[in-house]
Amino acid sequence: MTQPDNLATIKPQATSHSHNSVLVSVIIPAYNTAQYIHRAIGSSLIQTHRNVEVLVIDDGSTDDTLRVARYFAGTDSRIRVLTQENAGVSAARNYGIREAHGEYLYFLDSDDWLEPDAIETLLDAQSEHPDCVICANIFATRIEGSTALLYVSPVRMMMPPHNVSLREIAATYCGLEQSDVFHHLHAKLFRAPVNTKFLEGCVYAEDAAFFIEYFMQSGGKAYYINKPVLNVFERKGSVVRGKYNPQIFTSLIEAYKIIIGLADDDEIKQLMLASLNIRMSHCLVWSVRYRAGLNEINRIKSALRSSAWLTIKRRNIPLGVKLKLILGVYAPLPVYKAVVITWNWLKSLRGEKRHGEEVIPNWQDFPKAPCE
């Protein structure tokens, strides 16, 4: 595919839907993603739904992110670039919420990119289900060397469009339903005014807490469409794919105080608690794999020990999950470390190929800003 000279030459297809006049604010928090942000900005501008504003919030980047964003702002009046001292992604998103003019908000990570009809697809679903939060499917892309590998969750693709309850969301959080579509902000449309705020200083699970709080404030109704509208870039060095940081566990606990507190009956509270226990066990594996200090490992084990039994004794929790929790709580640390090391070794032997991967040509379909 030949790349155009600038974003203004990329022409979306016209759309004739009645919601053409609806302004959608695409909020892009950005920190040190100069080599990727052109895709996020470009994919927002070439939407078949033309009435968008793109808010790039630079979170005190130390690379060329701000320069790249300002370059593209000079090519299209729909882009606004805002800056703040480094305060984290939650603070940047909250800034975007305050400054957005749109009737709907879409949160886009600066290393991800939208399908050309993403906003139109979400607005179409919103017009058919006006009292629901619209949730769509995603593509996930992992870069290995110079090759882009595409993955579409076969489980999500098999899920029919349907109304979603808080119980179903809670069930996906703790693995009873094999889908992660409700765990994050990806591929969701939020109606303004958005009174929910992100937990500032929180680096993990802040999106889940935001979504559950917004979901409950909006009447507790969601609708799922299984069309992928977003490309999620799984890159090394991101919070969830990088080395373990103690802030991750602290953030997890803070986020789940909100999530569990919002549950409206005991069954859902227990499912959310199971989700917290499962994520704490993931943090334990993570901390051992990256050789976190003994104090941090013991902090996680202690928290897990205080509530894991409530999840282990539940009949509907998968056996594999129960075994992980039992090992995390009761196995001596040397034994637990040996299990983690062995498991990682077995994973490396069989590789991490996942069903549904294929090579994507021309994965950088949007022109970059010229070098100065």
Image: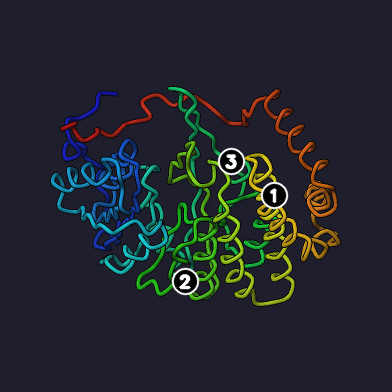
The image quadrant where one finds the C terminus is: top left
Instruction: State the CA–CA distance, disc 1 to disc 3.
Output: 36 Å
User: Which residue, given by chain and number where applicable, does mark 1 sit on?
Assistant: 294
Q: Residues within 10 Å of mark 1 (few under 14, many from 20)?
A: few
Earlier-in-chain disc, 1 versus 3: 3
Point out residue 17 in the picture as x, y percentages from the top left corner: 30, 56
| Residue for point 49% across, 76% down | 217
| Residue for point 45% across, 52% down | 187
Instruction: State the CA–CA distance, disc 2 to disc 3.
Output: 27 Å
Q: Residues within 10 Å of mark 3 (few under 14, many from 20)?
A: many
Point out residue 204 in the picture as x, y percentages from the top left corner: 53, 56
Earlier-in-chain disc, 2 versus 3: 2
Q: Which mark is residue 131?
A: 2
| In front: label 1 or label 3 | 1
Q: Secondary structure at mark 3?
A: loop
Q: Which mark is residue 153?
A: 3
Instruction: State the CA–CA distance, disc 2 to disc 1.
Output: 49 Å
Q: Quadrant of residue 356?
A: top right
Residue 94 vertical position relative to residue 7 in the rendered view, above or below? below
